[in-house]
Image: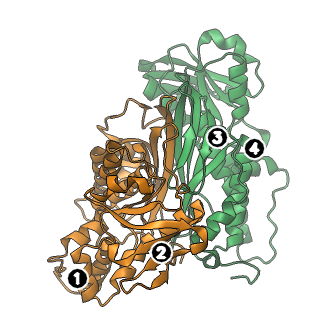
Chain colours: A green, B orange
Amino acid sequence: MDQNLTEISQLGEFGLIDRLTQGLENRHASTALAVGDDAAILHFSGDDDVLVTTDMLLENVHFDLTYVPLKHLGYKAAAVNFSDIYAMMGTPRQITVSLGISRRFAVEHIDALYSGIRLACEVYGVDIVGGDTCASNQGLVISITCIGTAPKGTAVRRSGARDTDLVCVSGDLGAAYMGLQLLEREKVAGKGVENFTPDFGGKEYIIERQLKPEARRDIVEILRSKGIRPTAMMDISDGLSSELMHICHDSKVGCRIYEDRIPIDYQTAVMAEELNMNLVTAALNGGEDYELLFTVPLADHDKVKDIEGIKVIGYITDADKGCAMITRDGSEFPLKAQGWNPLA
Amino acid sequence: MDQNLTEISQLGEFGLIDRLTQGLENRHASTALAVGDDAAILHFSGDDDVLVTTDMLLENVHFDLTYVPLKHLGYKAAAVNFSDIYAMMGTPRQITVSLGISRRFAVEHIDALYSGIRLACEVYGVDIVGGDTCASNQGLVISITCIGTAPKGTAVRRSGARDTDLVCVSGDLGAAYMGLQLLEREKVAGKGVENFTPDFGGKEYIIERQLKPEARRDIVEILRSKGIRPTAMMDISDGLSSELMHICHDSKVGCRIYEDRIPIDYQTAVMAEELNMNLVTAALNGGEDYELLFTVPLADHDKVKDIEGIKVIGYITDADKGCAMITRDGSEFPLKAQGWNPLA
């Protein structure tokens, strides 16, 4: 190990935890007791529902440290959990962070990872209230659980979409996936090349979408401020196609979406062209967009159609009609859940 | 892979989750929405504090599948989280379960693991409300987060021990550690031996303490029923010595415990003798006992002294006196946190 780095065994588990959690301030009145006991204590009012979500990230399955900076990884690991809470129209409040750390990581590496987690918590106003830290002989393991709240009975589930509802998405799709393809290409190109500088010129947006996704708090706030309550909502982590089929399955409905309505950034399109990949497939199945997919009653059309960052891409049908995309030439193409399979 | 087993890729992630969570019933009125959405929804009354704890277990760091049956592993992984909630005088209500699964595991293996988790949830009345399932190229990874409740303001922290309080422990100590030593011995003995049968005769108790620990709900219930509110409490996962020093550090006090008061089962003593290991060291530093360590005001002495399964082992002093054990010959032996170091 580099002599400028500190071996984790020099600090021990409690020393490491002390270092990582030093100066943490509790932002929420609901955080009564955070790190340092058998459990954290949270006070919520009886008017709130408590939301819980969890996510596990494993090295070389979910991330490749060849091109993912540890700080970005920490930020992303936290943000994707916040995204799940926003996808219920909730507000993230607290997280617990468990880390499995193998010997090749020094204290400074874990500092960098944790600084990303802390930054995300700062940006989204979330408290770190606990966790677990242990040795791993298997690379880096990150498991984050997020607690959120929503006023009682207002959390939006996947199961509420109804016939004639409008299907909406925030932001644009496929960029994170094309960013990943670019990172993988440059990784291969850089193999064994000394002082290799990857070529990301003009591709900053898709790289950022892959490495530092944001949770769409802004969209949830706009919906709230306009009095729009989605009938169903999910965040897009496995790809639009797969998530839309989840909503339709759970709501017992079908859907039609329009190919020409799917929002795609020009950098995504250019990259797909360059790599000779199908752009629509990337947008439908790419995954890791962390945009919000939701349905609203048809009566809300006038309210949603002019909101910047939200696009109406189709509508809900009865279940018999199945799930399909209407292509540019007017034909129907059945949707498939070809989303990224984390068990493949 | 054995032909009678089912490859996980045949089911896919959602198929596996469906299978694992099939027939799960929600026991708590507070579980409004469990598995299958972006987040679980929990309703708690405003009169409750919410407790959160989390634990990560990694193959070949925390468990060795050579001798740990998967069902027991699942049970233990859940029970140790419940133990943390009881150690706050709380009641565990819900858990999320995240699994990283490598290719050598078949569906039936994960069924066995999950059946242990479900059994523990049944025994302790806890709901499974979510989780994450992903591929691992690093062996089995288990991360469980437990949510509990306690009437507002009643959760017992580590920081409340005061000078003259009595130090109490439940059950007996060192057995889980000696069970581990025995399992390791038989593993070595069985290496390369066909049809090897490990010799656990007369050692069933220490094996059970290692493989299937229970959380001390019964002790918490007795304390509640007798109106005893500990001033500080922790569960013993890293060893009595280390945990007691945590309480003293956080409470800014010292302590004296008596060697001859430390509760030890005779099987633990026999095993230590057989392996030529120091019995008191095993009881002080062994770890994984999952017994409760707590302090009560001196005035409660009459209430605690006759409770079966609770032993008064010493008392709290002011901080200047430090933490020490009084040995059988009357000398003072300073306590050290030689607990199991998960980062070593």
Q: Amino acid at mark 1?
A: Val
Looking at the picture, how far across and down is residue B282, in whole percent?
A: 37, 79
Label tally: 4
Residue B270 got which mark? 1
Mark 3 vs mark 4, CA separation in Å: 16 Å
Looking at the picture, how far across and down is residue A229, in whole percent?
A: 61, 19
Looking at the picture, how far across and down is residue B56, in whole percent?
A: 48, 60
Residue underneath mark 2: B339
Disc 4 on helix, strand or loop?
A: helix
Q: Nearer the viewer, residue A12 or A290?
A: A12
Mark 2 vs mark 1, CA separation in Å: 22 Å
Q: Is residue B179 left or right of residue A42?
A: left
Q: Residues within 10 Å of mark 2 (few under 14, many from 20)?
A: some
Q: Earlier in the sequence, mark 2 or mark 1?
A: 1
- Relative to A190, say whether A167 is above or below: above
Label 1 resides on the chain identified as B
Mark 1 vs mark 4, CA separation in Å: 57 Å
Q: Can residue A156 be seen at all in this image of the molecule?
A: yes
